[in-house]
Amino acid sequence: MTQLPRPPYVQCEDVFKIHKTHELEVVALRGLDLAVAPGEVMAIVGASGSGKSTLLNILAGLDQPSAGRVRVGQRDLLTMNDQELVDYRRSEVGFVWQQTGRNLLPYLTARENVEVPQLVDGVDRRAAGARALELLAQVGLEEKAGHRPNQMSGGEQQRVAIAVALANQPPLLLADEPTGELDSATATEVFAALHALNQATGVTIIIVSHDRTITERVDRVVTMRDGRTSAEFVRRVTFGRERLAMEEFALVDRSGRLQIPREYVDRLHLGTRVRVEVQGDHVEVFPVTSDEERA
């Protein structure tokens, strides 16, 4: 019997986000579509202003979309009230910030930091302590349980932050530039901890980054441009052996919109209009002449 694919754990459909001020409106997301499978470790990359941080804040329940549909598990983030958002942030999603100082309370030890979200959620102190030690062991820092943040390196602090984010066993972990302030070797340790926790718990992990080298650390990378997803890089597995190169795909959204890579636009001098023709089993895109463009 053919096994049907599992539905996405994160599903964004035609999502818009408009930031309004007294003088202007800024459209951060412009009809974004995105699907993330349960248990997937994937990344979203893009230049500053592409909308990736806005998307992460929406998925974290820190902001709400202006229009569209955003589902995480069985929850519709567009229709939740304030209390439902609080419950969602407390139990359904964990968050790791880029700045290590935002993730941990400086006057508490690593173990105590991991205990805090559990105690807030009503977990017994003894059970919270045992859970904290278990998570610290999973990120390779059990021996640092009694250390405060200023007694640990930046990479160790981020690994403790990951443990804090997963303290209440959320099914979704979001990380905003988690290695942005770390060197390459330390970043590798942080990603190793993320993958180990993914394998141990099945948590779905979404990482936002501006660094294209993240393609070497995850199985799928989605790029964003101008508030939409534009391309996808997927690591293929053939005959049980992982290919070193990532395969690139352009993305077509639910409305049939396709973002042509900027380098192709520049190379072919594409203007505001192009010709699109179906040729057998594929589509061809042609630039129009200057006379046609003026017409």
Image: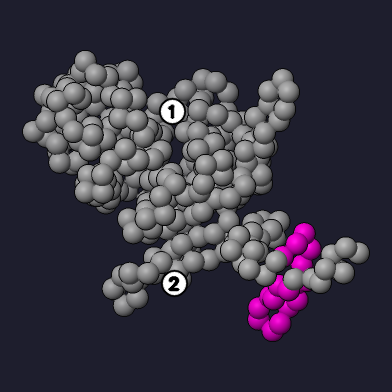
Q: Is 14 displayed left or right of 98 in the figure?
A: right
Q: Tag 2: residue type?
A: Met
**Quarter location, residue 269:** bottom right
Secondary structure, mark 1, is helix
Q: Which residue is at 68% across, 23% downward?
A: 21
Specify the label residue 89 is tagged with: 1
- The numbered dot on residue 1 is 2
- Taking the spot 54% from the left edge, 59% from the top edge, the residue there is 231
Classify 10 Å Cα crowding around label 1: few (below 14), some (14-19), many (20 and above).
Answer: some
Residue 79 placement (x, y as % from top left): 61, 31
Q: Which residues are magenta?
A: 270-286
x and y percentages locating residue 86 in the rendered image: 47, 22
Query: Which sits in the foreground, 231 or 4?
Result: 231
Can residue 258 be spotted in the picture? yes
Q: Quadrant of the N terminus?
A: bottom left
Query: Residue 125, how many percent across, how many down?
Result: 20, 18
Q: Residue at x 66, y 56 (%)?
A: 254
Which residue ends up furthest to the left in the rendered image? 143
